[in-house]
Amino acid sequence: MATTLDGTVGTFDIVGNRSHAQREKIINNFVKISQYITWPVLYVIFHILFRVTISGRENFQKVQRPFIIISNHISYYDSFLYRLILGLRTPHLPLRFMAVTKFDWRFLNILESIGIIEFIYSLFGVFTIVPGLGLNKNIAHAIEIIESGGNVVIYPEGQIHVPDGSGKAIGPFKKGASVLTQMTGAPVIPVSFRVTHHWFRKRIKINVGSPIASLSNQRVEDITKSFYDSVEALHARV
């Protein structure tokens, strides 16, 4: 049983949920391998193209899985940066990323139409949501993943946010991550990405915050604000 967005108590189909959990465990085991073996390639690529610095990585040692990661969304490549954040030897694989299949960048929509995006998603355990389907239905898959022992990564902005000079480096947060932690009791780790120019290469500064315990006794709006404030404070660190 779990509390839904409107405050009512819902009951999950035990038999169906059990079969879904078994399916997710199989996916988790596959994705753990695929994510593990990508570390050398991603390490070389990112350190050639960018100047990457990571602070607060030790905070992952303070949390037990499964957990939820929230962060701002700076580009299409930031999901791959998580493999560098966790490091070569980590007990926290796999990470399961919440994503969409419609993009602002036309090239990605072309890749999606010919099945490339679906292939990449299946290879790395990405699960998708459908805008307009409803919050509770969209996070149902995330609940199954957490119940099967997988860790979920969510970008609460819901899209890539590029600072536009309005003074807000991070876009408004949606409620999905807040409802998910309410319904699962999973702790949350805030992460921030910040891109600046450094000589001939861009600098990516990554800050990992301390785990946030489940806030199930608070309103969704208050939890969402707390998550936003945590990521914003990390982003402001030099």
Image (cartoon, rainbow, N blue to C red):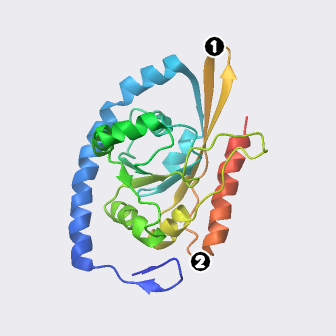
Bin the neighbour count of mark 1 within 10 Å (Cα to Cα): few under 14, some 14-19, many 20 and up. few
State the residue at coordinates (65%, 50%).
Answer: 231
Report the residue marked by disc 2.
217
Task: Compare marks 1 and 2 and give the one earlier in the sequence.
Answer: 1
Q: Judge from the rendering whether residue 207 lies leftward or rightward of residue 187; answer left or right.
A: right
Helix, strand, or loop for circle 1? loop
Q: Residue furthest bottom?
A: 8
Q: Judge from the rendering whether residue 32 lies leftward or rightward of residue 235; answer left or right.
A: left
Toward which corner of the image does residue 136 lie, by quadrant? Answer: bottom left
**64 lies above or below 200:** below
Q: Is residue 86 visible in the rendered structure shown here?
A: no
Residue type, label 1:
Phe
Residue type, label 2:
Asn
Q: Nearer the viewer, mark 1 or mark 2?
A: 1
Numbered tag placed on residue 200 in the rendering: 1
Q: Judge from the rendering whether residue 193 lies leftward or rightward of residue 83; answer left or right.
A: right
Q: Residue furthest top?
A: 200
Q: Judge from the rendering whether residue 208 lies leftward or rightward of residue 138; answer left or right.
A: right
Toward which corner of the image does residue 128 lie, by quadrant? Answer: bottom left
